[in-house]
Image (cartoon, helix red, strand yellow):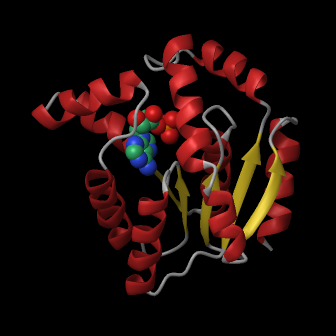
Amino acid sequence: MKKHLLFLGPPGAGKGTQASLISELYDYLHLSTGELLRKEVEKQTTLGIQIKEIINSGKLVDDELVLEIVKQNLLLSKGGWILDGYPRNMSQADSLTKVLNELNQPLEKVFYLNVEEEILVKRLINRGRTDDNEKTIRIRLNIYKETTKPLIAYFQNLNVLEYIDGDRDLKIISDDIKQKMA
Ligand code: AMP
């Protein structure tokens, strides 16, 4: 059973939902950079206020800051983990590869959840987070296409990529993922 996993895909593809389901089932750590950043925002620290502005603009938070969050959490993890929403650009992917080498915990599978753009927009608008308004959604989708999508090829080269059709029933998707984790 694979235990070092990563979920890649556009905003609204269901990465968070699937990562929650799978991590609960196998008792893995669910490491969502979006969730961890939102937690920092809730604390209303100076850093939290800066992060909030970036999240609400739809742009990406500073690479170094996110790397620090990821490192700290991976260091605490003893068993399996699922990275959700990280990496989001080539520099983050390189940093992650380095950190995982140092920790001797190589990535075993990357699940690429794919969903068509217009379906994503509808899903996100219905979700209703503060960054789920149409303007911010379009910005996030463009950043995804320009900076995150190229990571599909990066992970393909590492021979860890699994394609998942994300436009299906939630349970069918998680069954598909479970099967591909074996
Ligand atoms: P998410 O919950 O994954 O949709 O992330 C929400 C927001 O948090 C994103 O739009 C970014 O502003 C920020 N964020 C999450 N993960 C990252 C990351 N890996 N790098 C930079 N910013 C991130």
What residue is rendered at 71% in x and 16% in y?
122
Q: Quadrant of ligand 1?
A: top left
Q: Quadrant of residue 150?
A: bottom right
Q: Is residue 85 above or below residue 125?
A: below
Which image quadrant for residue 179?
A: bottom right
Residue 131 in percent (x, y) is at: 45, 20
Q: Is residue 129 visible?
A: yes
Where in the figure is residue 143, as x and y percent of width and height? 52, 36
Horizontal relation, residue 169 to residue 64: left or right:
right
Name the residue at 64% across, 63% down: 26
- Asked whether, in this view, residue 63 is left or right of residue 94, the answer is left
Residue lying furthest front in this view? Answer: 146
Quadrant where the C terminus is found in the figure: bottom right
Give residue 79's position: percent from left, percent from top. Answer: 50, 74
Question: Above or below — where is 64 with respect to 130?
Answer: below
| Side of 155 relative to 143 (left or right) | right
How many numbered circles does the render carry?
0
**Is residue 34 at all visible to an observer of this figure?**
no
Residue at image location 68% in from the left, 46% down from the top? 18
Q: Residue 93 at x, y = what percent?
A: 48, 64
Q: Residue at x 45, y 87 (%)?
A: 104
Position of 10 relative to 117 (above/below): below
Q: Quadrant of the N terminus?
A: bottom right
